[in-house]
Image (spheres, grey):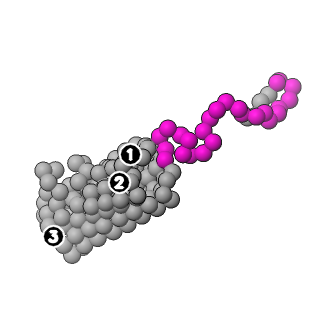
Amino acid sequence: VLTSTGSGVAWEDASGGGASDIDGLSDCLVENNSMWLGNDPSGTTNTAIKSVAVGATALDAVTTGDYNTAVGNDSFTELTTGSYNTAFGVHADGTGDWFTTGQMSTHLGALAGAYLNGSYNTFAGALCGMGASAAAPQTGASNTAVGYRSMGSNSLTTGGGNTCVGVWTGYSI
């Protein structure tokens, strides 16, 4: 700690019992080559390896899903066993958080991929790639949507192999 007596500046030992590493913080966890900052899901992580979560409730339900990255409050908050997924943005798996087992998907933007549990999807833009409803997870796979509400009319259900680029493109798929 840098201190000053008014006539000089000095460094002093900062003894006081603070955390000595990230795992020593109450809302962080480091285990199995994974790191959670903002929450401690140690009761669920089981054997999940090599994942990173930043944000309150980000990736907090994971059990055996490996190699996931979730940045943003509530991003991938229901992901349990899916692997090789990336989410950046608040609720970057959507309201209702249905993304539980999807594989190799990327959700970038607020509510990207809402109500969808499909694999191999890439959604870049707020509200893009939205499924039909919160009533049940939709399973559309191998879709790419780029732009605000691209493929995002809440009508995507089981469709696959679609590519939409631009604001509101593919809105009624």
Q: Residue at x 54, y 45 (%)?
A: 23
- The chief SS type of the magenta part is loop
Q: Position of residue 157 (x, y in %)?
A: 14, 63
Categorize mark 1 by other alpha carbons within 10 Å: few (<14), some (14-19), many (20+): few
| Nearer mark to the viewer, of 3 and 2 | 2
Q: Indicate whether 1 appears above or below 127.
A: above
Q: Report whether 74 appears left or right of 115.
A: right
The mark tally for this picture is 3
The CA distance from mark 1 to mark 2 is 10 Å
Q: Residue at x 86, y 29 (%)?
A: 8
Categorize mark 2 by other alpha carbons within 10 Å: few (<14), some (14-19), many (20+): many
Categorize mark 3 by other alpha carbons within 10 Å: few (<14), some (14-19), many (20+): some
Label 2 SS: loop
Say which quarter of the image contains residue 154: bottom left
Q: Which residue is mark 3?
A: 159
Q: Which residue is mark 2?
A: 62
Please state, as top left, top right, bottom left or bottom right, where the N terminus lies in the image.
top right
Give the residue furthest to the top: 6
The CA distance from mark 3 to mark 2 is 26 Å
Give the residue furthest to the bottom: 161
State which tag comes first along the sequence, 3 or 2: 2
Q: Nearer the viewer, residue 97 or 7?
A: 97
| Nearer mark to the viewer, of 1 and 3 | 1
Q: Which residues are magenta?
A: 5-29
Say which quarter of the image contains residue 151: bottom left
Q: Nearer the viewer, residue 58 or 62?
A: 62
State which tag comes first along the sequence, 1 or 3: 1
Q: Indicate whether 20 appears above or below 78.
A: above
State which tag comes first along the sequence, 1 or 2: 1
